[in-house]
Amino acid sequence: MHETSYAAANQEGTTGLALGALAFVYFLLVWIPGFAGAYGYFIDEFYYLVCAEHLDFGYVDHPPLSILLLRCVRAVMGDSLPAIRLVPALAGAGTVLLTGVVAGRLGANRFGQLLAAAAVMVCTPYHVVFSFYSMNALSVLLWTLGFWILVEIERRDEPRLWLVFGVVLGLGLENKHTFALLALGLAAGLVLTPARRHLTSRWFWLGGAIAFVLLLPNLLWQATHDWASLEFYRAQDLGKNIPTPPLEVLTLQVLAMNPATLPIWGAGIVFFLASERGRRYRHLGWLFVVLLGLMLVGQQSRPDRIAAAYVILFAGGGVLLGALSERTRWLRTALPALLIVFGAALAPVGLPLLPPQMEADYTALLGVVPQIERGEGMRSHLPQWLADRLGWDDLTDDVARVFASLTPEERGKAVLLGPSYGQTAPIEFLGRDRGLPRGYSAHNNYFLWGPPPEPVEVAIVVGFGDAASQTPRPDPNMARFFGEIELAHVHRCQWCMRWRDQLPIWIVRQPKASLREAWPELKRYM
């Protein structure tokens, strides 16, 4: 008996070491390319860095937790690429490790645990979110942690763990509002299965109360800011998301999560919904089915919306495929080989591994340059998550040259104006070393930080119009506020998103109307 226990403990220890090794490899895979190649800061990272200088209990387009964490990172390590991308890379490593652990808690053998962890390592949406700083990396990790606790509640029949789940849910909501999808899917799964017994447990409702208390600061912020995030989400749905037929939605799920993982998460669905071993966890299978159903009904074009839910399917698939591999030994070679081949082939799609020209040629060869938002300007030769890491220094240099062309008196008065944080935040952040002024915009949280101080006698305006034709056209609003409009430069960027190629940079003077008075009508939450 003692020898059996020792052997089991030894096997568990070696499995843990193997999972740790996979997590470390994944950490290096998503961290190092983020600062070692030709690519720089991602567009949203500039915005988050500026948000970290304006700490608050909420922001128009996201809750505050990830921004608070970024502020801490900057205080300790600075704001270099290796520093700020350490957090998402660690979140990726933690997700790989926890997925294997959850598979083990569900009953997977060593092969099944490693297979579940390896499945995470080859998924393009995970490559993307773990390779630059955003709330999404922390969100995936928190989803995985939440699944671990939900499994332990059933496995140990310990309802008091709902308190711990409440903490995770509250933190998840303070990090990203769409974390509510986990709560929604879970509620549906509980109602549809015998696990509904938890709905009568005081621990379940106390856990919900903890989540509410943790979310309360952001709710109070929303209430005092006219529920800005709701307005933002409505505009996103109407103006950015591309309506997609249900069959295409399903196809995009398979392709985005890497076709090689389909046998694993497919087995996970079988484990949770049809197998005897998964009976007590049936609600977790329904959780995924409900979320996928919402994607199909809502015709959502973004396959990453429920990407975090796949970790529990990988864990469940590891149980069935691990057991099957003990009888069908060739699976122990075939499944890892499938993941390695497809993982290596698709890694450059999500990670900045190739120079732009090679990346463009490679993704064109594979036929995987998706357009994830509406508008001609949202097209590129590269995937958006790579294209939006290029050209920012060149754009800032162009603006700096325009700024230098002003007279010394004008430079002392000038402000920077942009139609969105996409133009404003990068130039404001990178422009500090070049002596550029503060940026203003009526877009998302920049709206709350504005308007610029009156009077605006001279401004450098980045965007607001187009220069695609031989006669550049400024935005009509510019003529409304300024009497003199001068096209100072047209910025070019071959590998950027199209909205940044041929981007006009204007100098405006002679104010005609007050930006401060018109600021409320200029607000744009999207």
Image (cartoon, rainbow, N blue to C red):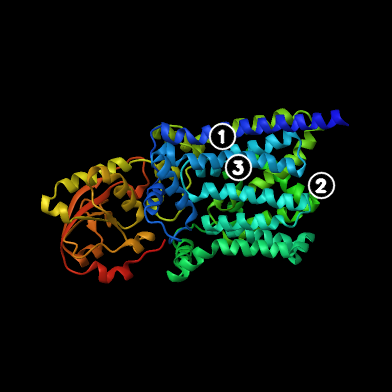
Q: Residues within 10 Å of mark 1 (few under 14, many from 20)?
A: many
The amino acid type of the residue labelled 1 equals: Tyr
What percent of the width, then of the height, locates residue 360?
Answer: 42, 36
The amino acid type of the residue labelled 3 equals: Thr
The amino acid type of the residue labelled 2 equals: Arg
**Mark 3 → mark 1, Cα distance in angstroms:** 10 Å
Quick check: 512 above or below 276?
below
Q: Residues within 10 Å of mark 3 (few under 14, many from 20)?
A: many
Q: Which residue is mark 1?
A: 26
Q: Which residue is mark 2?
A: 277
For residue 22, side relative to residue 441 (left or right): right
**Mark 3 → mark 2, Cα distance in angstroms:** 24 Å
Mark 3 or mark 1: name the one nearer the start of the chain: 1
Q: Nearer the viewer, mark 3 or mark 2?
A: 3
Q: Quadrant of residue 198?
A: bottom right
Q: Which image quadrant: the N terminus? A: top right
Q: Which residue is mark 3?
A: 95
Mark 3 or mark 2: name the one nearer the start of the chain: 3
**CB atoms at circles 3 and 2 under 8 Å apart?**
no
What percent of the width, then of the height, locates residue 510?
Answer: 14, 63
For residue 273, side relative to residue 217 (left or right): right
**CB atoms at circles 1 and 2 under 8 Å apart?**
no
Q: Residues within 10 Å of mark 2 (few under 14, many from 20)?
A: some
Mark 1 or mark 2: name the one nearer the start of the chain: 1
Q: Quadrant of residue 211?
A: bottom right
What percent of the width, then of the height, locates residue 58?
Answer: 45, 61
Residue 407 visible in the shown view: no
Residue 66 visible in the shown view: yes
Residue placed at 44% from the left, 70% from the top?
224
